[in-house]
Image (spheres, rainbow, N blue to C red):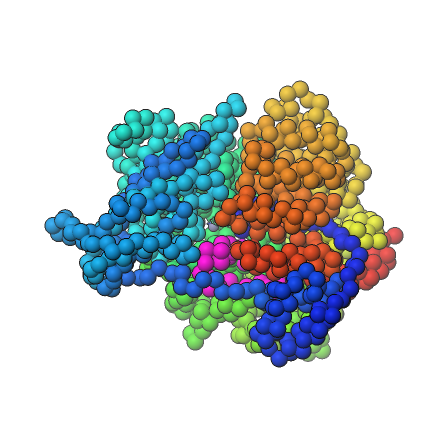
Amino acid sequence: MTQSREVLAMMDAHTTTFGRKNGCTISRCGAFLLSVFFLVCLVATGFLVYHFAPCLDENPRKSCIDTTSDSVISTAKAFSTSSIKKKTENLRLPRSVLPDLYEVKLIPFIWEGNFTFNGEVKIIVNVTEDTKNVTLHAVDMKIDEGFTSIREYSKMSNRTRPIEILEQRNDTERQFHVINTSGTLKAGKQYVVHLKFIGYLNDYLEGFYRSSYKVRNQTRWIATTQFQPTDARRAFPCFDEPAFKAKFQISIARPKNMTSISNMPRRGEAKPVSGLHWYLWDNYETSVPMSTYLVAFIVSDFEMLQSEAKNFRVWARKEAIEQSRYCLSIGPRILSFFEDYFKIKFPLPKMDMVALPDFAAGAMENWGLITYREATMLYQEGVSTNGNKKRVAEVVAHELAHQWFGNLVTPSWWSDLWLNEGFASYAEYIGMNAVEPSWKVLEQFVVHDLQNVFALDALESSHPISVEVGHPDEINEIFDRISYNKGASIIRMMDHFLTTEVFKQGLTNYLTERAYQNAEQNDLWDALTKQAHKSNALEKGVTIKQIMDTWTLQTGFPVVTVSRQYRTGAAELTQERFTLRNGTIVTYDEKQPLWWIPITYTSESQLNFNKTQPSYWMKAEKTITINDLGASSSQWVIFNVLETGYYRVNYDKTNWQLIIKQLNKENFRNIATINRAQLIDDALNLARAGKLDYSTALDVTSYLAHETEYLPWKAAFVGMGYFDSMLAKMPGYDKFRKHALKLLDNVYKQVGFKDSINDPQLTVFTRINVLNWACDFGHDDCVRNAVAQFQNWRTTPNPNENNPISPNLKSVVYCTAIRVGGQTEWEFAWQRFLETNVGTEKDLLLHALGCTREAWILNRYLDWAVTENSGIRKQDVTLVFGAISSNIIGQPLAFNYFRNNWARLREYFGTSLLTLTNIVKSTTRGINTKYELKDLLEFATEHKDELGSATRTVQQAMEQAEANIRWLERNHAAIRDWLVRNTA
Ligand code: BES
Ligand code: ZN
């Protein structure tokens, strides 16, 4: 997931694709089974899957697939339903033995030809129920079974008594190491479990892994950790579930010329390591009680900078350490901001932040030792962009928020992961706003997080925020936009309907009550309900659980349709689930979900866009009536003020027309900026779902010709991106391009092709977006400027040191020049990529390298992306696939590459399917022909047992593709007509 967040943050949503004409004919088996399919599905979904599955299993290639009818689509649906199989049952640890204190000692050997570590762990455990075994997690390590011991431990006498071990066994399926004893371990007693082992410093970026970088062509190695969610078990045997909190006493041996760091400060001086004279032991202080996934340690030769108080430190390669100044300046301020926000002091004595050359996610919130990839922590003034700077601030704030929400109070199990990630994803905006108020980030939440996840949550293959998970694959799968963005959106909704004061006090109570323990969503709901009732922010009979269960346990989100009665001034509000499949396919789900929806609105006469406390609630009711809206029949009303509710709004035709009229008047700013972005996003998506005619939706967007603000434009660009990717190879695309350029004309003139240091952040972002689109559509002035600036750089002496292009313009200049240029431009950028010392610059270049139209270069680029030592790190492969997939020539190449090289990719990424999931996402996003869908389905069927955590993503990709195909069938003509009518 996280790599995808990285990549998505970099990419605009204009993926493009095209497919070939359909060619296959329906086979008899296919025809027969398909009729069975439709008949049975009317009766029961379960039956349907049962009847259909053999066809998929026995002959996936020929018998079931037909590209000439709707059957590909139904087959995709059948795959989705049948492939959801239960993973191994009972993967959870028994609760009879609970860890209290770990003493972990590790000696990593960090050089070519070795890459192993010796380890020893002593765990003091409490037995809560009589038992004859100790079961804990261990993966990919060799445990010295002859060494293992269990001793009864008496704290009083500090004496131990050995317990006889019967046998030890590895349960590889469940990643358990089981130690059976002859005698019974007694409830109420303490024991010491002692194990010795050898582990492996892998290069899959999980567990205890190795990372490297070069200085003057010489490789430097480091050893570092990434444990969330289930990889602490790769570093030492442990009770690797979040509810098994314990204290940790870590000791790391490191070569004398390197340093080590861990969650806690070092205790005393470094000590000699017997038998290894060039190594020293660093012994760390005992931690507070914490979950295993938050443990971290790093051995490196990094440099460090520290805050004045010396308790906040930043670490990076010597050559990059100066780039950590920005992080060091905002980090301590955000940390102390959160201390005030939560009204709880940060409990650890120090905070370290480390920028790692190889890191799978964007960053990781290990308690007191936050790890980052370089591009999310390091910022170089004059080289990095405003967007890079914002990314650093947002990631720092996100991980710091976790220090309370997640680390101090931790979900009991991964099904509540969304609480952690959703909260941190919301709080990152609040933390960022505290240190950079001029950026106006709170406004941006709606377009970046909320509207962004609507697209995914509108799929039937979406999932509830709160899901049952067991297998590590399933756990990894939920680090997705539903947990992050939807989580954040519904938490924001609470902040508004409860009021911030009540919300914050409820949070403080929850965190204080559950500190150093675990919690479930119900615990948070209880704390908020109590506070809400105390402060009269909620009706007495109503609980937060009642409201929020409708948002966390059900999939999807509602659209509220407002039908006004213009004569009486009343309105009827109806809710239903918003899906892209509306009316196109049989719905298997009989029960229609209903939500508790906070209703806010304003009208042309009130113009009150500040009141975000609900005037009404739809209490899981299908319909409610508002008797008097307070608007005359000639005045518009707009619901969901500032889009604080997680829902879309549709109106009757007249109200849409009133809104369109207002948007086209000079005072269109009477409607708040966020709500203008909402209107664009809602209108385009309602049309996409068949709930609003396209001509109305497009009429809503016409006013953009006068719009200059970031939010409405950003919403429009996302919508435009969808059009672009669907229409790019269709006849009539020129009309679309012409129309888009016409809309952009005014705002292009406003922002211009010049970056100015004094411009507000949002102006800078608007400029980048506008220029990227204008250049993409071939805007003369734009392309000319971009090419000239790139050529200027190419002819500058020493281009590594001297880049004359203003940082914010780089993305558009690089991409455009490489797109319209040839091999020379590409090779130049590739050299700069290899040679730059700045992580953010590497990202920009990697993205731009995907812009070329030369198919052979793109294919070579794909190959390099998965070749050891090519210069492209494993952490960046998703970025490369993402960049190529957002290029119209590249998308089918990337899709084919991933299908044809599945085995190679699997081997390259090892057990971690994270990257593959992201590759699936990006390469399939633009699919809009049955032929490509058929390919995808064939691939999915053939590999259905190997998809692991990519399973749901594949289902979502198929549903998305299916929706795209339907969309083209239904709307292409209407859109073409509108464009013909509206482009002179
Ligand atoms: N806890 C995650 C890191 C993580 C993600 C670990 C996936 C294991 C699997 C961390 O807090 C996080 O969410 N990082 C984000 C950055 C953030 C600003 C959204 C990321 O890695 O993209
Ligand atoms: Zn997080």
Q: Where in the figure is residue 788, as x and y percent of width and height?
A: 75, 29
Can you name the residue that lies furthest to the top here? 797
134 vs 946, left or right, is left
Q: Which residues are magenta?
A: 459-482
- Can residue 709 be seen from the camera position used here? no
Q: Where in the figure is residue 186, as x and y percent of width and height?
A: 20, 61
Quadrant housing residue 7: top right
Q: Residue at x 25, y 33 (%)?
A: 268
Chief secondary structure of the magenta span? loop
Asked if the stretch drawn in magenta spans residue 288, the answer is: no
Q: Residue at x 16, y 50 (%)?
A: 160
Q: Is residue 418 above or below residue 886?
A: below
Q: Where in the figure is residue 46, as x and y percent of width and height?
A: 57, 74
Quadrant housing residue 875: top right
Q: Is residue 756 above or below residue 156?
A: above
Q: Nearer the viewer, residue 648 or 708?
A: 648
926 vs 384, left or right, is right
728 vs 910, left or right, is right
- Can residue 281 be seen from the camera position used here? yes
